[in-house]
Amino acid sequence: MPSLDRRRFLRDTAATTALVTTAGLAAGPITPAQAAPAAAAPTPSARRKGAVSFRWWGTAGWRVDIGDRTVLVDPFLSRIDTGLFKNAFNPAKALTVRTDVIDPRVDRAMTVLVTHTHWDHFMDVPYIAKRTGARVFGTLTAYHLGLAYELPSTQLSAVKGGEVLDFGDHSVEVVGSLHSRNPSYSVAFPGVRVSQPAQPATIADLPEGDTLGYLLRVDGGPSVYFTGASDVAERNLTGLAPDVAMVAMQNATTTGDYLPRLLEGLDYPKVVVPVHYDNFETELRNPPPVAETDRARLNDMIAAIRRISPRSRVLVPEYETAYHF
C-alpha cells in the first residue's frame, strides 16, 4: 500500500476524542471547547508511562506531555505588552522574560520546537532552555540567536525542513513553511541571522528568520501538525495527513486561499484547532481574551473550516486545558 494511502487509512480509522465548540459562529462571545475525555491508552512502549496531553499556552504555544517526556512548541508565556492590541505598537519594547509566570508552568522539557523567531514565539525560549536543559530545534536564525543568549551549541539544532527526528516513543518531522503577510503584503521584522548577533534587547531584535511547521507523531497515539504563522507552502505537506492540525488564524486577507490550500495539503485533518487568535499581551487566564476584530476573524475561520472540510471537527481551545486526541 503506498505511504500516503496507509497514513490516510490509519488516520481515518484511529479513534480521536475532542469536543467541538458550537458557539464559534455566534455573534456573541466565543465559548471555548471543554477538554475531551481521555481515550483508552494504547499499549505503552518502553518509555511511555502515561497518556499524551496537549495544553495550549496562547499564541502558537503548546506543552505536549508524552508519558514522562515534555515537548514545547513556541512557548511564549511572558506575554509582554507591546501596544500591539492598543494601536500603539512599540518596536523598541524591551524583552522582559517573566520568570514568575514561566517557572510554575515549565518544570521540565526535553525539546523545544521553534516555528520562527519573532518575540511572541521565541523570546522565552533561551530562558526555558537554560532552566530545563531542553534541546532547541529551529532555523539557522534560531541557532544563532541561541548562541547570542549563551546557550551552548550542543543544545541547539538547526533544521530546514524535511528532517525526520526519531525520539523513540515519538518522532518530529520538520516542514518548510512561510510567514503570513500583513495588509501591506509585508512581514514584521523580516530578515535572518547568518552569524551570532549581539544579545537581543528589544522585540525588533528578533526577526522572523524563516518559518517552519512541525509534525509530531506519537507511537500508538495521534499525529499532530503545528503551525506558527498563517501562510503555507502546501507542496511541502504532501503525505503528512495528520490527525490534528493546530492552525494559526489570519490577521489579513493578503495570503490567497490560505485555509483551502492548507486543509487540502494536510488531507483534511479529523480535528482542526484554531490558534494565534487570542490577545497574547494579557494575563494567561480563561476565557482567552479576543480582540473584537479578531473575534470576527475567528468566527469567519470556523465557518470556512466547516465549509472547506465538513468532516473535520473544530476545537477552540482554552488556556492550559489538557486535551487528548
Image (cartoon, rainbow, N blue to C red):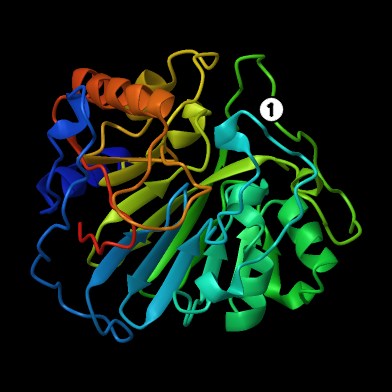
Report the side of 5 relative to 139 (left or right): left
- At 10% across and 54% down in the image, what residue appears? 15
Left of 175 or right of it: where is 246?
left
In-front residue for pair 292/18: 292
| SS for callout 1 | loop
Residue 165 coordinates in the image, percent (x, y) = 51, 63
Q: Position of residue 65 (x, y in %)?
A: 35, 72
Q: Does residue 31 appear to the left or right of 57 in the view shown?
A: left
The picture places residue 285, in percent across and down from the top left corner, at 36, 57
54 to 50, vertically: above or below: above
Q: In the rendering, at what x and y percent does residue 21 appear?
A: 15, 39
Asked whether the viewer can see residue 178, the reply is: no
Q: Name the residue under label 1.
A: 187
**Residue pictured at 49% horizontal, 47% vertical:** 280
Q: How many marks?
A: 1
Q: Which amino acid does label 1 sit on?
A: Val
Q: Can residue 297 be seen in this view?
A: yes
Q: Which residue is drawn at 20% across and 56% down?
A: 325
Q: Is residue 46 shown above or below 276?
A: below
Quarter holding residue 122:
bottom right
Q: Is residue 260 above or below residue 98?
A: above
Q: In this view, does 140 lie above or below 300?
A: below
Which quarter of the rendered picture does the N terminus lie within? top left
Residue neighbourhood size for the residue with mark 1, other residues' Cα within 10 Å, grouped as few (<14), some (14–19), many (≥20): some
